[in-house]
Amino acid sequence: MRQVALVLMLALAGCGYAKQKNVDAALVQVRQEMRTADEATAQSLGARIDQNAQRVAALEQQLQQVRSEFGGRIEQLRGEFAGMIAFDLPVHFGFALSDVRPEDQPVLDRFAAVLKQYYPGVTVTVEGFTDAAGDPAYNLRLGKLRAESVKAYLVGRGMGDQQLRTVSYGEARNRLVAPQQAGPEPGAESNRRVTLVLDTRPASGGTN
């Protein structure tokens, strides 16, 4: 509104209806108001960034405790994925199966509890994987079923359906944990897994 008033005053000045000193005074006031608004915006943004960093630090600390208790691997992604955390849980699947096994439920329970307490709004992508046995197209479908199975379990533990996404990488060679093992062979189970990727970047225009 102040900018509109200034434009109007400048127009009037051109028509001889406003004195130049009044226009100059209005211009000084508008510039001051804009500077004050910019400073307030910068302070608000800085506060949101600090708050987000504190929440991420608390989340990472708790995830490290989950890793120490159950195993798995945590990786802070870099580059274009900076602000995202990849958490390889020790959640595996039987050969050609997609159901969450009873022995893997406790770690998913802890994961859901940590996120609900320390970062309830974070977006999580559940990535599903298979070993290299079978047809690649079949494995893509199977990986998706595994990701969806884990998503359904986490929703059942109180996580929001909208904050959970699923994707399948099937038997992607660059993501296999044990490239030489497949099917019912010992060690192939490590390939039949999920990875949870947490997007901790602050949402534009607000906080998570």
Image: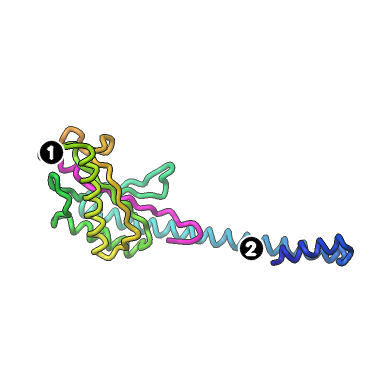
Q: Nearer the viewer, residue 2 or 21?
A: 2
Q: Residue at x 14, y 45 (%)?
A: 96
Q: Nearer the viewer, mark 1 or mark 2?
A: 1
- Report helix, strand or loop for mark 1: loop
16 left or right, relative to 143 = right
Rendering colour mode = rainbow
Q: Residue at x 22, y 59 (%)?
A: 153
Q: Residues within 10 Å of mark 2 (few under 14, many from 20)?
A: few
The quarter of the rendered structure image containing the N terminus is: bottom right
| Tag 1: amino acid | Gly
The quarter of the rendered structure image containing the C terminus is: bottom left
Q: Nearer the viewer, residue 194 or 114?
A: 194
Question: Disc 1 vs disc 2: Cβ atoms closer than 8 Å?
Answer: no
Residue 86: x and y in percent read: 32, 48
Instruction: Identify the magenta region.
Output: 184-208
> Is 195 within the magenta?
yes
Residue beneath label 2, please?
Answer: 37
- Report helix, strand or loop for mark 2: helix
Residue 150: x and y in percent read: 23, 55
Q: Residue furthest right?
A: 16
Q: Residue at x 19, y 39 (%)?
A: 131
85 left or right, relative to 15 = left
Residue 114: x and y in percent read: 29, 61
